[in-house]
Image: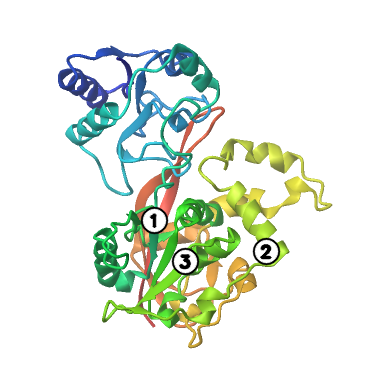
């Protein structure tokens, strides 16, 4: 087997290459220093496997190139010691840290060795074709989530109950002993749970979740329903099920007893109008990791006519990509369990307020609380978080994005 390794051009990258060489003495391992896109294209076309170190860093060290989505090839093992850009979604999961954590070289090496054990030599024709058509040669499913049996949706306050449910499902407690493949996203599993994200960043994460929902055969809700529906994220997850017209079975558990309860009609009867479905489609298309293409924004803005054409859609607005939306728990509080897709899409319920980055930066630097923009009495502590990243398929391939977090501290 031939393994081509593209380490970052720094000392940690060199250490990773050396560690892989030591762990794989029987593998023909080539370290590729050439930073041109053609070098990666050549390796994707000719090697049995490629280790692509996508650890973000300075332009002189990182290995991001304008080659379209190399990590979507089944035999390209994307690894990273820190978290990836939000629009980089590798076919094989597990080789990169999640936000805001890190992954050691030893852990990465163990994952690579494990993945290579699941792979075999590739036929020459498949190698060549896969360089042009990512995923053509692989045995992996179309998305990383295709084997999912159950998706567990919950509010952070119910995390202990959600984790208990996950354990029950994995041992087959609700399925006559048949073990279930479960996806439960822990708070912060895709980004910091306190992060205040611009609209397209929010929809980027929801697009990933929608892939999971689409692939699942069961959608589990951890109640109580009134509290469950008080979050943008949980409402969004429920609407993803409606968007896909998903026949995944909806099931609910009581967080106190852990017992399954009847499904509330407010959960089961959620539907989208044709216009709302089109709106979801536009948002998902422009925010999904495999489609969002931030490098196209300026070109789309130049094509605007002001007459309602394709390029006039607000998904291309600068504000959609740069102005964070703050969710206020005070303004979002309600006592009934009705949900309204239109209000959700208009950021009315839950209530989201645009807050300029400059204002967030001022409060983060000063430490002074920030009041709810609507004056409801809730105040927030603002903190500066580790930056997010966007990958660009053209031009400068890696962009750092400032992120802030908000924690409600009183009213």
Seen at 15% across and 19% down, the residue is 22
| Res 314 seen here | yes
Reply above or below: 311 against 73.
Answer: below
Q: Relative to the observer, which residue lies in front, 54 or 72? A: 72
- Pick out the residue farthest to the right: 307
Display coloring: rainbow
Q: Relative to the observer, which residue lies in front, 401 or 177? A: 177
Q: Relative to the observer, which residue lies in front, 367 or 40? A: 40
Q: Position of residue 345 (x, y in %)?
A: 61, 66
Mark 2 lies on residue: 276
Residue 270 got which mark? Answer: none
Real-space CA distance between mark 3 and mark 1, rounded to the nearest whole angstrom:
10 Å
Reply above or below: 371 against 88.
Answer: below
Q: Position of residue 265 (x, y in %)?
A: 53, 81
Residue 249 got which mark? Answer: 3
- Pick out the residue farthest to the front: 176
Seen at 35% across and 17% down, the residue is 121
Mark 1 lies on residue: 149
Instruction: Give the left or right position of residue 295, taking residue 127 as reference.
Output: right
Instruction: Give the left or right position of residue 43, taking residue 20 as reference.
Output: right
Number of numbered discs visible in the structure rendering: 3
Query: At numbered mark 3, what does the secondary structure look like: helix, strand or loop?
Result: strand
Query: At numbered mark 1, what does the secondary structure look like: helix, strand or loop?
Result: loop
Comes first in the chain, label 3 or label 2: 3
Q: Position of residue 113 (x, y in %)?
A: 23, 28
């Amino acid at each position: 087997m031939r393994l081509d390794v593209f380490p970052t051009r720094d000392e940690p990258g060199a250490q990773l290459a050396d560690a892989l060489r030591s762990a794989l003495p029987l593998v023909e391992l080539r370290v590729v220093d050439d930073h041109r896109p053609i070098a990666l294209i050549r390796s994707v076309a000719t090697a049995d496997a490629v280790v692509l170190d996508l650890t973000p860093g300075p332009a002189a060290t990182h290995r991001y190139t304008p080659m379209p989505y190399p990590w979507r090839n089944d035999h390209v093992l994307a690894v990273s010691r820190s978290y990836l850009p939000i629009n980089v979604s590798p076919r094989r999961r597990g080789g990169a840290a999640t936000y805001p954590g890190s992954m050691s070289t030893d852990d990465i090496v163990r994952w690579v060795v494990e993945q290579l054990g699941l792979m075999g030599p590739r036929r020459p024709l498949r190698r060549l074709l896969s360089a042009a058509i990512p995923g053509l040669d692989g045995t992996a499913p179309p998305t990383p989530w295709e084997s999912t049996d159950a998706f567990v949706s919950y509010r952070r306050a119910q995390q202990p109950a959600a984790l208990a449910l996950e354990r029950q499902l994995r041992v087959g407690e609700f399925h006559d002993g048949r073990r279930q493949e479960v996806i439960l996203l822990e708070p912060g599993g895709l980004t910091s749970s306190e992060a205040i994200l611009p609209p397209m960043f929010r929809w980027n994460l929801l697009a990933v979740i929608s892939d999971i929902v689409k692939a699942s055969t069961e959608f589990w809700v951890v109640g109580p329903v009134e509290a469950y529906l008080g979050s943008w994220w949980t409402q969004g997850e429920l609407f993803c099920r409606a968007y896909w017209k998903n026949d995944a079975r909806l099931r609910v558990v009581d967080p106190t007893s852990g017992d399954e309860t009847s499904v509330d009609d407010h959960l089961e009867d959620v539907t989208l109008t044709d216009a709302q479905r089109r709106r979801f489609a536009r948002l998902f298309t422009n925010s999904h990791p495999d489609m969002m293409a931030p490098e196209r924004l300026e070109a789309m803005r130049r094509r605007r006519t002001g007459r309602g054409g394709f390029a006039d859609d607000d998904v291309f607005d600068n504000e959609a990509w740069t102005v964070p939306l703050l969710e206020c728990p005070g303004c979002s509080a309600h006592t009934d369990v009705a949900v309204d897709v239109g209000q959700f899409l208009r950021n009315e319920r839950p209530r989201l307020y645009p807050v300029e980055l400059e204002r967030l930066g001022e409060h983060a630097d000063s430490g002074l609380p920030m009041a709810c923009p609507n004056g409801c009495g809730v105040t927030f502590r603002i903190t500066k978080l580790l930056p997010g990243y966007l990958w660009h398929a053209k031009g400068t391939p890696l962009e750092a994005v400032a992120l802030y977090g908000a924690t409600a501290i009183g009213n």
